[in-house]
Amino acid sequence: MNKFGVSAQTLIAAAFGAAIMGSAFAVPKLLAPEAGAQPIAIQAPPGAPLSFADLIEKVEPAVVSVNVVSTQDLSELGDMDQFFEQFRGMPGLEDFFEQRREQQEQETPRTREARSLGSGFFISQDGLVVTNNHVVERATQIQIVMSDGREIDAELVGADPLTDLAVVRVKEPGPYPYVKFGSSKDIRKGDWVVALGNPFGLGGSASAGILSADGRELGAGSPYTDFLQIDAPINRGNSGGPTFDLKGNVIGVNSQILSPTGGSVGIGFAIPAELAKEVTDTLIQNGRVSRGWLGVQIGDLTPEFAEALGIEDVKGALIADVTTGSPAERAGLKRNDIILSVNGQKVTDSTSTTRLVAKLIANTKNKFDILRDGKPQSISVTVGERPADPNAISPVPGGANPAEPGAPSAVPGKMLPDFGVRLSPMDDATRIALGLRTGDTGLAITEVTKGGVFGEAGFEPGIIILDVNSRPVASVDAFERAIAEAKAANRSKVLLGLRVGQVTSYRTIDIPK
């Protein structure tokens, strides 16, 4: 080493590299330090280990591979249709394959045996293992493979598809090495994490990275989970495996990756330990998770929506629709109500409302503070138990099956040049087709002109306007009165309740000057 802390080999290598790569990639010259200056000391960040070996050696015996055999429905109709296309129009062959296709349609769908793999970890010495629901879904056989190679049959204790968590129990008595849930709240963005699991069936693999972010929402498919985002590489087969902090506590259960290639690109998601422990405890006790159900379709009360409604400093969830026969309807909740709190606990958006309601015990009374027509009030709601598929419940009164969406009312309607839209009252056929209740009113958009307010906002004919600033609009005159009231209140936009197909949503539009 020379007096600058650089070895001779390093200097030779740098000079050689500069010579063969050209000046554009030349290594900068080392400058003599000024008098009294000290060399820059590069130190590892506080808390960064020189090795993760001690941690991995400690926790690895509790991490397992999960091998699953399941049954899968096998339908060849799609493949046959694709195969059939190349013979279309050929005499004889076309008739033959058409008959074969009809025969397959009449046959009972067959099943086949499918094999898959994932990861998991022991959480008790008597053999309870946590993994992902999607790893063991439809399983007929479950086998746990331990780090020492032992293969042990297991059985499902319980699963929760909505959080993608499951618990299985090995059939041989323990004791088994196990790990404990820690707290994901104790680590910060940038802290080290270590993931263990069974990527691509390799088994016993470890990777390290940092907590990239927390509180990630991944859409409607995971309504109850704020994921941890980690950059420790996880791949297919890592599902259900643990993510550890440097103390050996499980701070997350690996569940998903974001990847255009199918392999790790450094964006993985883990279910936080707090939620995982809560759900797994419930699964161990009851075999399932029962969630409270309100029976509403809700959206965020955005600042733009609040501005249109003339309310300030209010956070909550805006009810877009109420399911017929639901606890919400029986309690008297209505479309356009704004939920402010549940049992005194304030909500901030639709996600926080969904999670609060899910934690309520079915068939118990609960206090909902709402804002209706700008006035606060409280409503007592006896929540139900969330159905397996809430979307399967018909929103149409009497359970009627809605017809195909019909054309808007044939009434010519009225053109509003300032808005660039023609509106006409919704007829009964359209109301029924859209799954609305008896007595629901609205205006059908029958024409949109270019350059108008509605055209610039992307509206198209066939959309139904149910209300303006929470006021029902049964006629074009009612629409114009609602606009006049908003103008008189010095508002620059209005909030429209819209029906598109069988979904109610909200949009704001600017009021023409």
Image (spheres, helix red, strand yellow):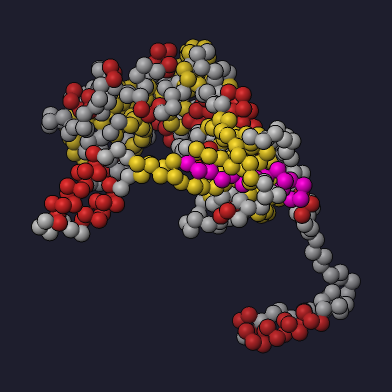
Residue lying furthest right: 36
What residue range appears in magenta? 56-70
**Residue pictured at 16% horizontal, 29% vertical:** 409
Please tell me in which quadrant of the rendered image residue 157 appears: top right
Is 266 on the left-hand or right-hand side of 321? Answer: right
Determine if residue 89 is in view.
no
What residue is shown at x 82% (from left), y 76% (from top)?
Answer: 6
| Residue drawn at (36%, 44%) of the image | 74
Where residue 264 sits in the image (x, y, percent)?
A: 56, 56
Q: Could you say which is closer to the camera, residue 269 or residue 371? A: 269
Left or right side of 349 for 499:
left
Any magenta on residue 493?
A: no
* Residue 497 shows in this picture: yes
Q: Residue furthest bottom?
A: 19
Examine the image and state in which quarter residue 72 appears: top left
Which percent across, then down, holds residue 372? 42, 18
Q: Eyeballing the image, is 400 above or below 130?
A: above
Q: Is residue 286 above or below residue 228?
A: above
Q: Position of residue 359 (x, y in %)?
A: 56, 23
| Left or right relative to 505: residue 259 | right
Quadrant containing the C terminus is top left
